[in-house]
Amino acid sequence: MNTNDPIFKVVQDLRNRGFIHTFTIQDNGIYCPELSKEVAPEDLTIVEQHHIDGPEADAANTHEIFGLETQDHVLGIMLDTYAQYNAAEFASIFNKVHKSKPGIA
């Protein structure tokens, strides 16, 4: 991955600050490969959200990067990439995740 890519920079910053796990949507749920287990969306809280605009020539190509925390204080990252493949399923699952502060959608 290009280290000048804004997504790379945000992910690297989050990892440097302890968000070392990865959360992905898989089989109608959220899965963490490092923990080798499914995590209930209701057990996650968004503690950070970063919006990345696509290049001017491709303004529709925007991304959201979420810093998440489990109930037992495991920190991890989720990208909204899955929403590009199945927006309805992403919304259905991700809407169950707790928002930690006003303004986080």
Image (tube, rainbow, N blue to C red):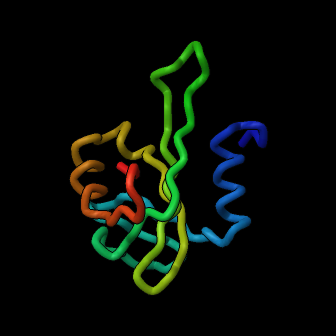
Q: Which one is nearer the viewer's eye here, 68 or 25?
A: 68
Residue closest to the far right? 3
| Image quarter of residue 60 | top left
Residue closest to the far top? 57
The spot of residue 14 in percent (x, y) is 65, 60
Q: Is residue 43 above or below residue 11?
A: below
| Image quarter of residue 45 | bottom left
Residue located at (36% from left, 62% from top): 99
Quarter occupied by the N terminus: top right
Q: Is residue 82 above or below residue 70?
A: above
Q: Is residue 53 above or below residue 22?
A: above
| Image quarter of residue 94 | bottom left
Residue located at (22% from left, 43% from top): 88
Residue located at (78% from left, 42% from top): 3
The spot of residue 15 in percent (x, y) is 67, 64
Report the label total.
0
Relative to residue 64, is residue 104 drawn left or right?
A: left
Residue located at (32% from left, 64% from top): 97
Residue closest to the far front? 102
The spot of residue 102 in percent (x, y) is 38, 55
Relative to residue 6, is residue 93 drawn left or right?
A: left
The spot of residue 58 in percent (x, y) is 53, 18
